[in-house]
Image (cartoon, rainbow, N blue to C red):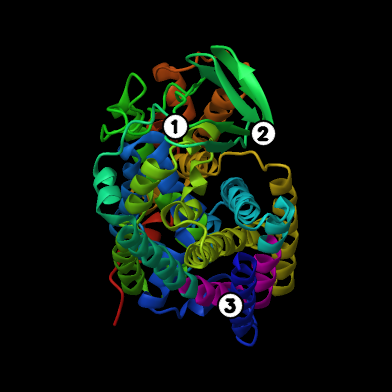
Amino acid sequence: MTGAAVVALVLVTVLIGARGVAAMRTTSDFLVASRQTSPLLNAAAVSGEYLSAASFLGVAGLVIKEGTGALWYPVGFTAGYLLMLALVAAPMRRTGALTVPGFAEARLGSRRLRQFSAVVVVVIAGMYLVPQFVAAGQLLTLVSDVPYWVGVVVAGAAVSITLALGGMRAATYVQAFQFVLKLLLFAGPAIWLLIVAGPELRGQMTAPPEFTTFTRDTDVDFRLDSTLVLPSPLTVVVDGEPRALTAGPHPALADQNWTFPAGAPVPAVDGNDEFPVPGSTAWGVPLLGSGSDSPLLATWSVLVATALGTMGLPHIIVRFHTAPDGHAARRTAAITVALLGTFYLFPIVYGLLGTVLTPELYLSEGTDTAVVMLPGRVAGDGLTSSVVTALLAAGAFAAFLATSLGLLLALAGALAHDLMPSGLRRLRLSALVAAAVVVTAALFAARIDVSAAVTSSFAVAASTFCPLLVLGIWWRRLTARGAVAGMSAGLLSSLGAMVLAAVPGSPVPAGGNVALLLSQPALWSVPLAFVIMTSVSLTDHAPPWTEDTMLRLHLADKH
């Protein structure tokens, strides 16, 4: 049933995408749909491509893993559009550029800056796109037992063919359709789950019990290698074989299945001290990183990355170039805030219900699968729960496809419009080739943490394009040399810090503020990029056409 729902979704996606074939004759048609997208359609498309795997599955999983403080993520995601509405939307549209690197050249007159910006687009889009395909493969494996590679290849083929056929116009129709579909398929099951759960379970959602004892025989499927620390001797079933374990640490290997008996104490996860036990007092603290020494610092780091990163995401920014004028771009951003705010009401339901019914996912780093597991936990394995699971799986797959369309479009634009001579045929070919490369990377990245990878791309976007856009639009003294220096500093510092924090055997001590600021560097990498960009620009001379450019950016649209 789940397979049929996903196949139907893919077919509808390609058929809708085929609508854009007849209207695609020029580069502008491919990249910005001839700038004729209405604000409501555009806002639905923006919301569709923005609500990725991290939103549809990840936020609820983060609530289970990190506590109620994880709800700061959707706050940051939505706040980014308020900043975009106030600072970026209308001036970006008035530049007449087709891409973010195109804006950089139009504002500062530097071909070298445009090419460097295109490289940054490739980095951000790659970091964001690979997790989408990984999540697609993981989801289909979970709900239908097909091999992981099938979901990855199906998602890659659907996205690349749709984009090659119809470009931005096809992407707009598909993403708007998929936003409506995702909202219905996310909200409907959430309401159904609340009704079926009953008053007792709904009462537990308001204050989930602390996960200290297994209330039933519980299977835990480990996706990554982990080390469990047992508080007392215990006999567990590992891949069907009973195994008597002593108190202390024991390795749990990736792809192993452990069955814990009812009444057994829950083991601790070695190296997972920054995450609170689901349902514990620390879990209920309304800040992120409540298991660390500085939860307020962790919360601010995530808010800076998500809000400023949203403003710097190349596949989101290009959406404002599809608006007829600056006024329409502003209306698009305003409507988007309302649409996203409506959607983000429902991850709270899934996260709290998952904390009550699937807390064991905390042990296996599989909390992002909670959404599609909940129907079976609430209503058993009957037909109704199977149908609801299939609908949720289709909605999640729609999230992967819609976001991947926007990212692949930005990637193709960077490769075949900013780095190389532009042309419609080259753009179509670039979309197919880029998708093939990303799919190949996703096949070898099955073990990555999808939510963490997506958040990392936000940190890079916040540290590079956010300073470029804010200063490029609002500060006349910005120069191309300053922009390159600031973006280079932001790119190297954010990427370098996250790699240093993630590499096994890193000299960075586990836990503490240093580890936090390296794994979530936006709080310092963004100010660093701003400071270097302004400092280098002050030692240089602004282009002579700056005054005319600034007037064009800020003069009101004619109606």
Q: Residue 170 in magenta?
A: yes
Q: For the point 33% across and 18% down, which residue is it?
A: 293
Query: What residue type is disc 1 on?
Result: Phe
Q: Secondary structure at mark 3?
A: helix
Q: Secondary structure at mark 1?
A: loop
Instruction: Mark 2: give few (<14), some (14-19) or many (20+) Cα within 10 Å.
Output: some
The answer for how far apart the CA atoms under marks 3 and 2 are is 49 Å
Task: Say which quarter of the image contains residue 328.
Answer: bottom left
Q: Residue 98 in magenta?
A: no
Q: For the point 40% across and 60% down, which residue is it?
A: 549
Which residue is labeled 2 in the image?
Answer: 256
> What's the magenta region?
156-176
Q: Nearer the viewer, residue 276 or 180?
A: 276
Task: Say which quarter of the image contains residue 559.
Answer: bottom left
Query: What residue type is disc 2 on?
Result: Gln
Q: Quadrant of the N terminus?
A: bottom right
